[in-house]
Amino acid sequence: MEFDLIHRYFKTPFGELAQANPDSVLLGIGDDCATLRILPNHHLFTSTDTLVEGVHFFSDDPPSVIGWKALASNLSDLAASGASPLGFTLNLSLPEIDENWLAGFSAGLLDIATRFNCPLVGGDTTSAGSSPLKTLSITVFGQAPAAHRGFNRAHARIGEEIWLSGTPGLARLGLLLEYQKRGYLEQRCEGVELSQIQALLAATTAQLQQRAVSRLRMPVPRVELGLKLRGLASACLDLSDGLSGDLAHISNSSGVSAVLFQSSLESMWRNCWPEIDQHADAAQLLKTLLMQTWRGGDDFELCWTAHPKHHSAIQSLGDDLTCVGVIETGREIWVQSPSAGRTRVASLSYNHFAEVPN
């Protein structure tokens, strides 16, 4: 049964992609080990992530969406390292065999694997035993020229600029919309925060809501951007657990402070939601959005530091790249307001052992 499932939903549909990469995939699904070959004078990069039903995705999420997101989160790690994809392995633990679910999951996984030319080269499928939850683990492999060793989080330097891609916090907005739709919002927020979030959700346009939910469900890893940042970025990471906590990793590793400009973050949101200034309470809406940006995860956008001399070169890489701050002495995260001075930002990122499961 297990081998039949592997052939039907993984080896057969993914076989063409592996065959299209004969120089790198020497041996794939069906043997005890996969054999990968990297280019001469290149380094191997690898990352692994686990997604658990009820923690990282809703039980009623479409399986194709789960398949997409499972690989996207790993490819985002390669993007944050400036590495190009080679292939990946997949481990699935399932409480039961649901062939409709497997077909949808496989299709979504194949879509993103094909888009980023990242063939499935092996893995394992097991029973979840007495657990009613699905668990997915992916390990991804990538490569980069030997002259590039990744963007070390400890390499941020005083005076460098802080950059963001996209709109971090957008996926968090999508999550709040999903909570509201499922009747969970009151369980996740309370008091003043709840009323502020309800006001925010009521003000959002249908188009913004669609974008936010799409970002939550099907993030697009910034692999191409990561490759272009070679030679420009110093420290870099992907935003999976919220801007405040993820940026704190760079701050702590490099022994520096990060000062974020409130006006730049607000401009980032205005570009995403141009109609926001039409609301009488636009200032409060922006304040609520920034709070969700600090704590929101699953954006899988990039955050990096770079010397100011690279500003123009980085700006030319895309319209949705924003310089939002600067690296200074210290070891904290600050937000600089035009009117209220600096305020220290506490780490509000996602904590796997503190959050309530979905």
Image (cartoon, helix red, strand yellow):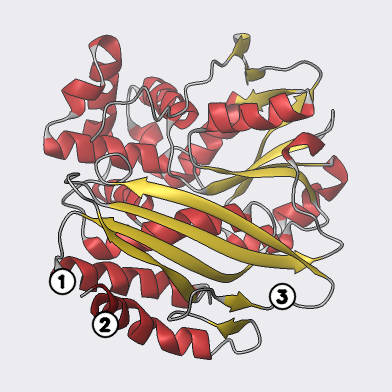
Quarter of the rendering occupied by the N terminus = bottom left
Quarter of the rendering occupied by the C terminus = top left
Which SS class for mark 3?
Answer: loop
Quick one: label 3 or label 2, which is nearer the N terminus? 2
Residue 220 visible from this viewpoint: no
Instruction: Please name the residue shown 51% across and 67% down the image.
Output: 88
Quick one: label 2 or label 1, which is nearer the N terminus? 2
Which SS class for mark 1?
Answer: helix
Q: CA distance from mark 3 to mark 1?
A: 35 Å
Q: CA distance from mark 2 to mark 1?
A: 10 Å
Say few, some or many: other residues with alpha carbon within 10 Å of mark 2 (under 14 / 14 to 19 / 20 or more): some
Q: What residue does disc 3 label?
A: 38
What's under tag 2, amino acid-wise? Arg
Which one is nearer the viewer's eye here, 79 or 209?
A: 79
In percent of width and height, residue 172 lies at 37, 37
What's under tag 3, amino acid-wise? Ile
Please state if 16 lies on the left or on the right of 264 as rendered: left
Please state if 141 lies on the left or on the right of 144 as rendered: left
Q: What residue does disc 1 label?
A: 99
In percent of width and height, residue 324 lies at 65, 34
Residue 83 visible from this viewpoint: yes
Mark sitting on residue 27: none
Q: What residue does disc 2 label?
A: 8
When asked about the image quadrant of residue 26, the answer is bottom right
Tell me whether circle 3 and circle 2 mark residues in contact (CB < 8 Å).
Answer: no
Please state if 159 lies on the left or on the right of 224 as rendered: right
Which one is nearer the viewer's eye here, 199 or 91?
A: 91
Instruction: Please name the residue shown 36% across and 22% down the image.
Output: 354
What's under tag 1, amino acid-wise? Glu
In percent of width and height, residue 258 lies at 70, 25
Quick one: label 3 or label 1, which is nearer the N terminus? 3
